[in-house]
Amino acid sequence: MRQLPPLSALRAFDAAARLGSVTRAAEELGRTHGAVSRQIRSLQAHLGAPLFDKAGAGLRLNAQGQALQAVVAEALDRLEQGWRRVRDEARGPGVHVACSATFATRWLAPRLADFYRAHPQVRVRLSMTSAREMRDEGADLVIAWDWKAFPAADQARAIPLAPVAFGPVCAPGYPLDEILGREIAVPCRIDHDFTSSAWDQWSAVTGRAVSGATELSFPHTHLCIEAAIAGLGVALVERRLIGAELADGRLRAPAGFATFQQSLVAIPSGERYQSPSARLFIDWLGAALTSG
């Protein structure tokens, strides 16, 4: 027999601990302030010790509360992820894929019809996120190229898909120094908020550096691309994402594209063994990326 307090009390405690307020916890849970307060008092009675200290009008976890929050938050996260997977599997074979919004909209989504034609029985669920958020999606697979900062366990599971090649791109007429020198000075360099190492990796591979008199920064590669098309500066972009713009002349890549040491990978979730649907998707994705 499990010696556990009621799940409703643990949920109330988790919400109050995260939000620092019983009132806000009640709003999140759709309960009354009094109901959440009673759940927390019940949990403290089970424990035989307080979990919070008063902090002005709010609450502050004490040492016991901090220790319990770490356990409860992890358990609820795992429970939520497991519930989603069981629910999705009950609806039929499927795979939940998390990737950057730009990769999803510019490359993956337009090609999903090919996957469905080959595997009509498999349903693909996409989570489009920023690079910063991708590991928190609870997906079966995370698709990423800038993954060396991920936890060691994630890196060990990474399945190589295809090389990535980045190059500085700009609008026609933008004053990009095209002389093959080591230092390339431009009026404005466009950076990505969460994959700022891309410029450093490009410099390490090419032996060249692009510096800007000013810099612009955006949270999504799509915005970096649009800023470059608008003539605002020089962006560093993976060539698969701008095939149409290069073909129709909206962007040019005077310095070409350089292949990075880090490749695009699929990282399976550590919560369960890789499913047959995930394996089918990985095999298809690797072949599609390699062919263009």
Image (cartoon, rainbow, N blue to C red):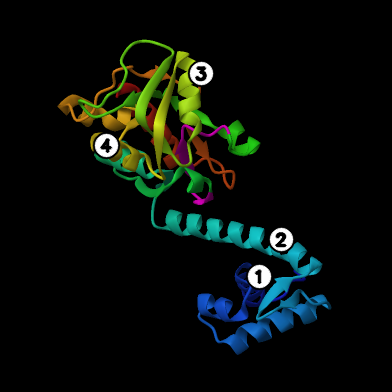
Q: Which element type, helix, strand or loop, lies under badge 1?
A: helix
The residue sitting at the left extreme is 248
**Magenta segment range?**
136-148
The residue wearing badge 4 is: 111
* Magenta span contains residue 146: yes
- Locate residue 172 relative to residue 160 in the image: left or right: left
The residue wearing badge 3 is: 204
Q: Which amino acid does label 4 sit on?
A: Arg
Asked whether disc 2 touches disc 3, contact meaning CB atoms under 8 Å apart, the reply is: no
Q: What residue type is labelled 2?
A: Val
* Magenta span contains residue 249: no
Seen in the picture, residue 161 relative to 125 is either above or below; the reply is above
Asked whether disc 2 touches disc 1, contact meaning CB atoms under 8 Å apart, the reply is: no
Which of pointers 2 and 3 indicates the residue nearer the eye?
3
Q: Earlier in the sequence, mark 3 or mark 1?
A: 1
The residue sitting at the front extreme is 213
The answer to whether residue 179 is seen in the rendering is yes
Asked whether disc 1 touches disc 4, contact meaning CB atoms under 8 Å apart, the reply is: no
Q: Residues within 10 Å of mark 3 (few under 14, many from 20)?
A: few
- Quick one: 77 or 52, which is closer to the camera? 52
The residue wearing badge 2 is: 71
Q: Earlier in the sequence, mark 2 or mark 1?
A: 1
The residue wearing badge 1 is: 17
Q: Which element type, helix, strand or loop, lies under badge 2?
A: helix
- Quick one: 48 or 16, which is closer to the camera? 16
Q: Distance between the residues labelled 3 and 1?
A: 45 Å
Residue at left offset 42%, top offset 18%: 259
- Quick one: 1 or 271, which is closer to the camera? 271
The answer to whether residue 116 is seen in the rendering is no
